[in-house]
Image: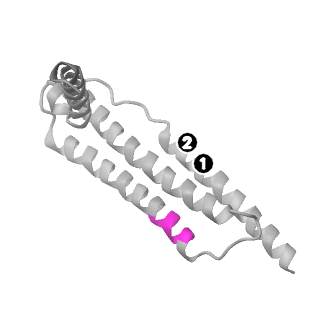
Amino acid sequence: MCFSQLRPRVRFNRLMWRLVRQWFDPTLAGGTTPDYRFSLANERTFLAWIRTALALVGGGLAIAAFVPDLRVTYLREAIAGALVLLGAVVAIRAVDHWARSERAMRFGQPLPVSRFPAILAIVIAVGALALFAAIGADLLRAA
C-alpha cells in the first residue's frame, strides 16, 4: 500500500476519533458550565446505570458458570448471553444519556426524555417470566 492510499484512511480515522471524542466529552460542544451540583448528579446517575450494566454482565456470567443444564436445550446459554448483551447495551446507553444530559445543561435546554428505563424494566420482566416458565416446566417434567 502506498502512502497516497493511506492518507484518506488516516483522515477518516481522525474524523471518527473527533466524533467519538465529542460524544464522550460534551464540554467540547461549548455552552456555559452548569452548576457543578447538576453535573455531579448527572454523573451519579451515570454511575448507577454502569452498576446496573455490571450487575447484568455479572448475572450472565454467573448463570453461565453455576446454573446446571436445563432440559430446554441451550436455554442457560441463551439467558447468559442475553444478560451479557443487555449489560453492554445499558453501558452504552448510560454514556449516551450522560453526554446528552450534560450537553443540554450546558446550552440551557430541557433534559432529554428517556424511555430506556421503562423499556429495560419490560425486557427484564419478560425475561424473568420466561425463565420462570422454563424452570417451572423443567420441574414439572422432573416430577
SS type, badge 1? helix
Is 102 included in the stretch rendered in magenta? no
The image shows residue 47, relative to residue 9, as above or below, that is: below
Q: Cβ–Cβ below 8 Å for labels 1 and 2?
A: yes
Q: Residue at x 22, y 30 (%)?
A: 22
Q: Amino acid at mark 2?
A: Ile
The image shows residue 32, relative to residue 83, as above or below, that is: above
| Between 38 and 85, the one nearer to me in the picture | 85
Instruction: Describe residue 68's horizontal placement relative to residue 11 as left or right.
Output: right
- Counting from the top left corner in percent of width and height, residue 119 is at 55, 42
- Counting from the top left corner in percent of width and height, residue 2 is at 19, 24
| Between 81 and 117, the one nearer to me in the picture | 81
Mark 1 and mark 2: Cα distance apart in space: 6 Å
- Counting from the top left corner in percent of width and height, residue 97 is at 35, 38
Instruction: Describe residue 52's horizontal placement relative to residue 82 as left or right.
Output: left
Q: Residue at x 43, y 50 (%)?
A: 88
- Quadrant containing the N terminus is top left
Residue, disc 2? 119
Crowding at label 2, few (<14), some or many (≥20) Cα neighbours within 10 Å? few
| Between 32 and 9, the one nearer to me in the picture | 9
Residue, disc 1? 123
- Counting from the top left corner in percent of width and height, residue 102 is at 24, 35
Provide the residue span drawn in magenta.
58-64
Residue 106 lies in quadrant: top left
Q: Residue at x 79, y 71 (%)?
A: 138
Instruction: Describe residue 57's horizontal placement relative to residue 104 as left or right.
Output: right
